Image (tube, coloured by chain):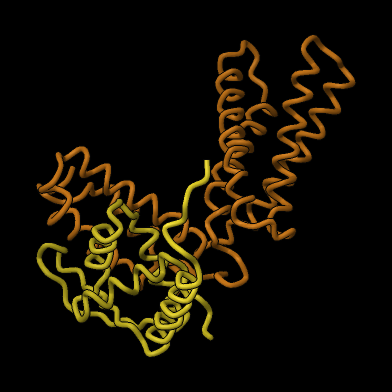
Amino acid sequence: MKAAGSPPRWAEFILERLLISKDRRTVTGDLREEYVEAILPRMNRIRADLWYVRQVLSLAPSCASARINVHKVLRLVSLCTFVCACWLAGVESLLRHSGFVMRLGIDAAIGLVALAAILVRPLHLGIRAERCLWTGAIALIGQGTEALIRNARSTHFEGFVLVISLLLMLQGILMFFSLGRGIDTPRNAGRGIGSLE
Amino acid sequence: MAELLGTFEQAVLLVMVRLGSEAYGRAILHQVNESLKREVSAGSVYTTLDRLEARGLIISKLAEGTPARGGRPRRYYAIAADGVRALNDAHRTMTALWASIQWPAKVSR
């Protein structure tokens, strides 16, 4: 529910929770004003609401980086993914079930993306290299989702597949949030819209 | 010479120059969209404002809100002396770079 001519209440609520106290009322006020005076008169309600949600999403990475060190979490998750990929590759090459070569290739690709996500910042490969890894992030989210759906449809549900698929999806999302955006670098560490309290 | 400003940082600062005393978050966001003729996300603008403020290039102060904002306050921004110097440096550097080449360049086939 929302009042006529105001942005979606749930999105405004999320934005208020994301922002720190210094920016909470000013930024939400700015977006509400733009929504009411510029966006809503120009487009229909659904498109205007989508515009508002897009703005909330665009603010989320900087808010998140101000509250938690996303890159540190990414490194930890990447390490777990890398260990899982190595373990899966090891098991595949021992059991050698049909189609194991293709699965071995997928495991190797996952391991390489995880390793790249760990090393891209310490090696100072630059923002372009980080943005190249967004392709890997999409692949990881796709692979994780596919494994999750297949596991849910399977006659015997396997817990470790659920854990690994959630891990892959989490890593993909964290890669989007922390890589290629120029945040968490030594120059910008701790900054972001939410950090100047 | 001060650390060179990025293109987007320059765009935000120049919009602030144009807006003068009316430079608050929403006005800057709106004007950046108009000036660049593309939709720029609020995240990019606020993160840039935040970074410029942390570098001491701009300063901000709170003012009362309006009914359209649900009474929420506005944060007005102004360019600090270091910000003016950084803009001047950026302008000088870019002018010198452009002056050193012949433009428009011929496209070789």
Expressed as whole percent of the image width and height from the top left, the position of residue A60 reads 42, 54
Quadrant in which the N terminus of chain A is drawn: top left
Which of B98 and A30 lies nearest the eye of the viewer? B98
In the rendered view, would you say A102 is above or below A51?
above
Residue at (46% x, 64% y) in the render? B102
Residue at (71% x, 34% y) in the render? A110
In the rendered view, would you say B65 is above or below A127?
below
Which chain identifier belongs to the yellow chain? B
Residue at (58% x, 64% y) in the render? A184
When asked about the image quadrant of residue B89, the answer is: bottom left
Left or right: B76 as drawn, with respect to B5: left
Quadrant in which the C terminus of chain A is drawn: bottom left
Which of B12 and B63 lies nearest the eye of the viewer? B12
Expressed as whole percent of the image width and height from the top left, the position of residue B21 reads 20, 81
Expressed as whole percent of the image width and height from the top left, the position of residue A133 reads 62, 44
Which of A47 and A23 lies nearest the eye of the viewer? A47
Left or right: A15 as drawn, with respect to B64: right
Give the colour chain A carries in the figure: orange
Q: Is residue A25 visible?
A: no
